[in-house]
């Protein structure tokens, strides 16, 4: 999108990003709507939803920035922090509301947020790998894998970082 902004493919890619993040917001809202009868739950999750939306916006900002710039890294770092704040809000609600239905809802929302945080880390790792910053890329991938060791995107990103670093002859360690 950044390299060839006037090309039809760039406009199409930007449109796909917009659609993707709209679907993520809708998926988040679907999880929350399951508990619409409980106004307190919706009120308590309001701040978490705001942090989640901030995370999506920052992740998109990172994707639209030049991968060689620090602006992308800063956007992804801000996205992860927003995601962590969203998780904190979920945990606060979980401490207040102990019923099984609410806990199930919060677990599904936690998964949606964690999946987005992992995406931020893998996006950052990809950009760092392209800049031959293999050690930093591996740190980013390891953070993603710490959240979900079986996440296929993070596992494959780790393999890409290892391959790119071995091809360069510098290694990631």
Image (spheres, rainbow, N blue to C red):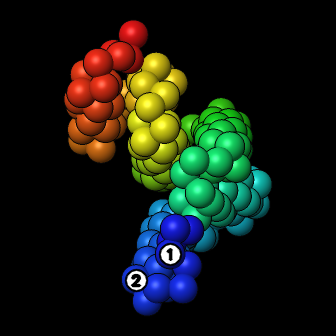
Q: Residue furthest top?
A: 173
Give 160 or 169, whichever is nearer the viewer: 169
- Please report whichever mark, 1 or 2, sits nearer to the chain's N-terminal start: 1
Q: Is residue 40 visible?
A: no
Q: Which mark is residue 107?
A: none
Question: Whole-percent x and y of residue 4?
Answer: 50, 75
Q: Quadrant of residue 97?
A: top right
Residue position for label 1: 4
| Secondary structure found at label 2 | helix
Q: Nearer the viewer, residue 56 or 133?
A: 133
Q: Quadrant of the C terminus?
A: top left
Label 1, label 2: how far apart the Cα atoms are: 8 Å
- Foreground residue, 54 or 17? 17
Say left or right for 69 vs 126.
right
| Number of other residues with Cα within 10 Å of mark 1, as a class: few under 14, some 14 to 19, many 20 or more | few
Assign a secondary structure to mark 1. Answer: loop
How many numbered tags mark residues here? 2
Q: In the rendering, at what x and y percent does residue 155 appear?
A: 26, 33
The vertical placement of 168 against 128, above or below, is: above
Q: Residue at x 24, y 27 (%)?
A: 167
Neighbour tally class for label 2: few under 14, some 14-19, many 20 plus, Cα within 10 Å: few
Image point (70%, 49%), residue name: 71
Going 63% across and 42% down the picture, which residue do you hit?
A: 73
Is residue 113 found left or right of 104 in the rendered image? right
Residue depicted at x 56% and y 68% = 2
Q: Which residue is mark 2?
A: 9
Q: Are marks 1 and 2 in contact (CB under 8 Å)?
A: yes
Camera-near label (1 vs 2) is 1
Q: Would you say 29 lies left or right of 150 here?
A: right
Relative horizontal placement of residue 137, taking residue 64 as reference (left or right)? left
């Amino acid at each position: 999108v950044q390299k060839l902004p006037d090309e039809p493919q760039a406009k199409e890619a930007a449109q796909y990003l917009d659609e993707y993040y709209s679907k993520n917001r809708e998926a988040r809202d679907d999880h929350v709507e399951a508990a619409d009868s409980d106004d307190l739950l919706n009120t308590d999750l309001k701040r978490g939803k705001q942090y989640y939306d901030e995370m999506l916006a920052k992740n998109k900002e990172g994707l639209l920035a030049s991968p060689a710039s620090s602006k992308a890294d800063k956007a992804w770092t801000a996205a992860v922090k927003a995601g962590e704040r969203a998780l904190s809000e979920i945990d606060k609600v979980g401490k207040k509301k102990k019923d099984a239905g609410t806990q199930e809802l919060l677990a599904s929302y936690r998964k949606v947020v964690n999946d987005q945080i992992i995406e931020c880390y893998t996006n950052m790792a990809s950009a760092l790998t392209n800049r031959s910053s293999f050690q930093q890329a591996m740190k980013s991938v390891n953070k993603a894998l710490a959240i979900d060791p079986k996440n296929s995107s993070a596992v494959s990103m780790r393999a890409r970082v290892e391959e790119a670093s071995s091809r360069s002859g510098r290694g990631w360690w």
